[in-house]
Image: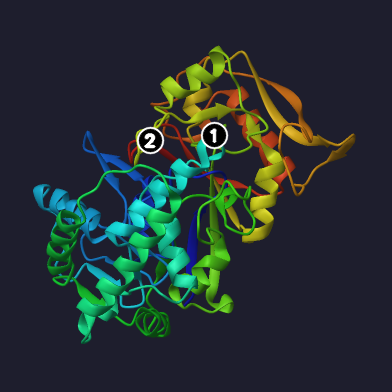
Amino acid sequence: MKIDLILGLQWGDEGKGKIVDVLTKDYDIIARFQGGPNAGHTLEFDGIKHVLHTIPSGIFHDNKLNIIGNGVVIDPVIFQNEIEKLDELKVDLNDKLLISRKAHLILPTHRLIDKASELSKGKKKIGSTLKGIGPTYMDKTGRNGLRVGDLELDGWDEKFEALTNKHLNIINNFNVDIEFNIDELKREFQASLNFLKKITFIDSEHYLNESINSGKKILAEGAQGSLLDIDFGTYPYVTSSNTTSAGACTGLGIAPNKINEVFGIFKAYTTRVGSGPFPTELHDAISQRMAKIGNEFGATTGRPRRCGWLDLVSLKHSISVNGVTELIMMKGDVLSGIEKIKVCTKYNYKGKNLDYLPFSILEENMTPIYEKLEGWEEDITKVRTYEDLPLNFKNYIHFLEDHLKLKIKIISVGPDRKQTILV
């Protein structure tokens, strides 16, 4: 047996949570491989919306294991709140949720560094979620971080105090005014650690490889999107981890030859939260319509998402670096009622037409080149089969498949589990 991956092909918010939830029935284990509580995976069923930040999106299914891998960074305070909300919904987590000992912990001072760093940048800020993700990954690569497994060893208090004091010195050096009560933050953090210890810790790379060898079916769940990848995204306006398929190898301890299918998710249009270049962004009534109908507000921060036409240049880039084998298109219903739909098929980059992502896609370096397609008026939110979709919608699908050289196997026409069409 091998492991399948599911990941976003744009700037995140593609709808990974819903599709993981839909696919979970076909797998034994759902394993999250990177990112932290800056992720917001939204699932909707039985008329209730659920937002997960750290916990894999298979948690609502019985008899399915959910693993938080070593590549994830965990904020114990946010994690506790997430668990308590699941308790309210009577979700039984016994033997369903496991955490890698090698996953790094987000300290309260990581969040403070994040805030101080953003404030110091002024208008050049990245658009961080201020969850402490970046500073935690910095400590990880700087070999200063604290990991889940450290909670089982002697000397935790000394390690925690040493790293906290180091962080406080860093915060002072930013020379910005932020208010906080470090003693109160410490008390809250320590209380949440006691809660975290109730979850089973595992040596995840051993556990997952043994599971593969014993015939278990595993789905690896990514967070954020490929255009936010620390290497292959729109740097420096990116997240702090490898959001691409390679991140699943390092974030779970899985060898490349163990990867089977790579499911790539994208919206029928494009959105972005926070700062950074966005070639196909719109500033008109159509973008407002997309935002309203698509409910384009961040599941983690509530920030409004910027909206624009679908960008096939960046999409092909993501397909290439991930080795995508199957495509999944979300929110096709949001485009209903738009008379003419544009799709970006090339960039004019410094006077040359390119069909690949160049080093910089800042507005002063390039302009998008569009093709126009006929839209559709029909409401497709109640459609359940591909055959019943409007002709112009199917033409849109065929146009995308021809340019991307891949089939779109799943189409989402609304947020609910049932609003999913398998092609």
Local secondary structure at mark 2: loop
- Residue that mark 2 sits on: 419
Instruction: Give 172 or 230, whichever is nearer the viewer.
Output: 172
The answer to whether the residue labelled 2 contacts the one labelled 1, judged by CB atoms less than 8 Å apart, is no
Q: Is residue 169 left or right of residue 60?
A: right
Question: Which quadrant would residue 229 be assigned to in this image?
Answer: bottom right
Q: Is residue 19 something that shows in the picture?
A: no
- Residue 230 in percent (x, y) is at 58, 57
Where's residue 126, x and y in %?
A: 52, 43
Mark 1: amino acid: Lys
> Which residue is identified by label 1?
123
Residue 378 seen anywhere in this rendered image of the structure = yes
> Which amino acid type is marked by label 2?
Gln
Residue 98 at what x, y percent from top left? 26, 71
Q: Vertically, is 269 above or below 153?
A: above
Q: Residues within 10 Å of mark 1 (few under 14, many from 20)?
A: few
> Looking at the rendered structure, which numbered label has been put on residue 344?
none
Q: Sequence-wise, which precedes: disc 2 or disc 1?
A: 1
Q: Say which residue appears at 68% left-offset and 24% top-offset.
A: 342
How many numbered marks, from 0 up?
Answer: 2
State left or right for residue 256 relative to residue 180: right
Residue at 52% across / 32% down in the picture?
A: 387
Q: Above or below — where is 95 with respect to 383?
A: below
Is label 1 in a helix, a strand or a loop?
A: helix
Above-or-below relation of 289 to 397 = above
297 sits left or right of 259 in the view: left
Question: Considering depth in this image, is 79 or 381 the residue closer to the camera?
Answer: 79
Q: Can you tell which quarter of the image residue 95 is in?
A: bottom left
